[in-house]
Image (cartoon, rainbow, N blue to C red):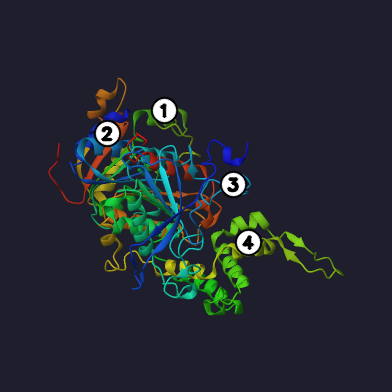
Amino acid sequence: MSKAEQADSVGIVTEELHHFDVPLDLACGVTLKSYDLMIETYGTLNQSRSNAVLICHALSGDHHAAGYHSESDAKPGWWDAYIGPGKPIDTNQFFVVSLNNLGGCNGSTGPSSINPDTESVWGKDFPKLRVRDWVESQARLADRFGIQQWAAVIGGSLGGMQAMRWALEYPERLQSCVVIASAMKLTAQNIAFNETARQAILSDPEYCDGDYLAQNTYPKSGLSVARMIGHITYLSDDAMGKRFGRELKAGSFQRGIDDAVEFQVESYLRHQGDVFSKKFDANTYILMTKALDYFDLAREYNENAVEAFKLAKCKFMVISFTTDWRFSPERSKEIVNALMDANKTVSYAEIKSNYGHDAFLLPNKRYEQVFRQHLNTLSIDEVAS
Amino acid sequence: MSMRVDLSIIQDWVATNSRVLDLGCGDGTLMATLRDNKNVGGYGLEIGADEITACIAKQVNVIEQNLDDGLSNFSDNSFDTVIMTQALQAMRFPHLVLDEMLRVGQECIVTFPNFGHWKARWHLALNGRMPVSDLLPYEWYDTPNIHFCTFNDFEVLCREKNIHILNRQVVAEGHLSVLKDLRPNLFGETALYHLSLEPKESSQ
């Protein structure tokens, strides 16, 4: 039996492209005349359209959250551990919608798409996006499915920021907001990591001031280093130590031998950078990290998160991971404290994990239990269409 | 002691529609009872993984937070009542916890086992060893209960801190329970105290 045929897999999935013609006014002042969103759905939308769940992806995610595109696919979608029949986001119960966000590079309109005005690639001229622009485009996606209210809007990291923005912008349109390993705004240290990653791309000569596609080049090494920097921050010191230690991939320290020494961790990081740089767009990486940096939940609410959250009407589930230092439990506690001060329905779990920020993607029994229990409490009509 | 008695007494002391913070809320039974019977809102704090899952299943708001880290994330008088059941004796600094409870809540309710109960006294007097019983089932070296007190000890602390005892109830089981009203510190197994920094009319 192939992996796609396993009972808890959504199996072979097909992506759908949705075209939108109604112009979208972006937060930066630019209007996008039309755009495409690439999406995948899992499960069945019920008659009352009350069982829909929106998955908001993080920095480098896309619409392919679960299942396989073909029998020969080696790996499933990025959140397959949590989406499927009998899994916490149970596709026997929920209709799951997952999209590649605007500005992405996996089928949705983004920097590598053609600008209809100039008929050439947008490149670095693609408008700067903010989290609220994604929420706006996701709301239009909901309209297209006739979904008045999501049973839940769920996201980890940058995805959690989108989920929280949903709760403020469209309070009537979600029953629950699940915020995982996220923050109300990035810390200076966090922005610093993003800027270092961006500089790695910008200083690659092949970046060509963002016009690499037109110039037929590609800032592969810059993007690769950017990913390596990010990757270090997604792991914990402990997890890296356990996995790689000081093991050598090549060479030795024996006296008299002058082999080039390569640590396992070097080789691993380079491989990660290499794989990533082949499938991801450099301008999208810059756009996504900037959206992360710019996000500040309370900016338009007198810098007061309690005031902001008072607008929300949904229930909240906030989850963090003990060894996550990129989006530490402290950041999640700030969310929870603001929600409690705003007298909102909220539960919070701090999951023990050795895997740092990456923990939100990985199997973990307690995380699964908490997640599942929360989604079980949502009221949806039983009758499927 | 049956949980029912405990719950019904606490329920009488908590006002309808009020906002409650339950410290060490366990599986959320108390918060769910208060919500269902008195339309009480608020949050439970808990660190037990299974208990937290149970709260979520009951749709009780539960926040994973270690009480030994304090309540500094809650502002003054942000709750009507702060409750702590059967956990004061497990705190590192019970007297500071009490201060914090009365800072965050207008009123507070604490319950704890009575170390002055005749069984405990009998056990120590006769065997010369720390009491182990159905009520206090732990050996001294692995007990979570690190700060035992008797009812009398607790009331001395309240006096020193100018804490007003709005209500007090003593609960006991078995055939000697009739004596609890006569000699609570000897025959009461569990104490329930309803406290405030402000003197108020007793609600009972």
Residue for badge 2: B7
In primary-sequence order, the first of circles 3 and 4 is 3
Which numbered disc covers residue B117? none
- Where is A145 relative to A100, above or below? above
* Amino acid on which disc 3 is placed: Ser
Q: Tell me which chain the residue with mark 2 is part of.
A: B
Q: Earlier in the sequence, mark 1 or mark 2?
A: 2
How much space separates mark 1 and mark 2, taking CA atoms?
A: 20 Å
Query: Which secondary structure lies at badge 3?
Result: loop
Query: What distance separates the C-alpha of mark 3 from that of mark 4?
Result: 20 Å
Query: In the rendered view, does A70 fall on the left or right side of B87?
Result: right
Kindly identify the amino acid type of the residue bearing the numbered disc 4.
Answer: Val
What is the chain letter for disc 1? B
Q: Residue at x 41, y 58 (%)?
A: A19
Instruction: Check disc 1 and give the amino acid type.
Output: Asp
Q: Nearer the viewer, mark 4 or mark 2?
A: 4
State the mark number for residue A70.
Answer: 3
* Quarter that holds the N terminus of chain B: top left
Q: Are marks 1 and 2 on the same chain?
A: yes
Which mark, by number, is residue A275? 4
The Cα–Cα distance between marks 4 and 1, rounded to whole angstroms, is 61 Å
Q: Residue at x 60, y 72 (%)?
A: A218
